[in-house]
Image: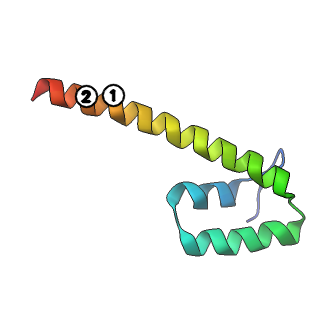
Amino acid sequence: MRTRVGGDDCSLAVAVSLRCDGCITVHANEAKKLGITEQELSEALGVVVSVNAGAAFVYSTRTLDAYGEA
């Protein structure tokens, strides 16, 4: 965890997005050591949820297109 942007920790957000349990543990511990607050962490996790929801929407549309072409 080396980059803190606008209260968000990029490394932890990426670890969550990739669903890497070990990475989440390491980066969550580091975030706490750096003084990142639970509120800041919650905001970063909100971004992760939004980004992943967007990807799910795009792939859902692609799936429907593929089904229509089958």
Could you classify mark 1 by the number of other residues whose Cα lies within 10 Å: few (under 14), some (14-19), or many (20 or more)?
A: few
65 left or right of 9? left
Q: Which mark is residue 8?
A: none
Q: Going 17% across and 30% down the picture, which residue do you hit?
A: 67
Mark 2 lies on a secondary structure that is helix
Q: Which residue is mark 1?
A: 61
The one nearer the camera, 47 or 39, is 39
Q: Is residue 36 above or below residue 44?
A: below
What x and y, as percent, mark residue 45? 68, 50
Q: Going 66% across and 74% down the picture, which residue do you hit?
A: 25
Q: CA distance from mark 2 to mark 1?
A: 5 Å
Quadrant of the image occupied by residue 11: bottom right
Q: Going 46% across and 38% down the picture, which residue do you hit?
A: 55
What x and y, as percent, mark residue 29? 76, 74
What x and y, as percent, mark residue 12? 67, 60
Q: Which mark is residue 64?
A: 2
The amino acid sitting under disc 2 is: Leu
The amino acid sitting under disc 1 is: Thr
Q: In what quadrant of the picture does the N terminus appear? A: bottom right
69 left or right of 46? left
| Mark 2–mark 1 CB contact (< 8 Å) | yes
58 left or right of 29? left
Q: Going 19% across and 30% down the picture, which residue do you hit?
A: 66
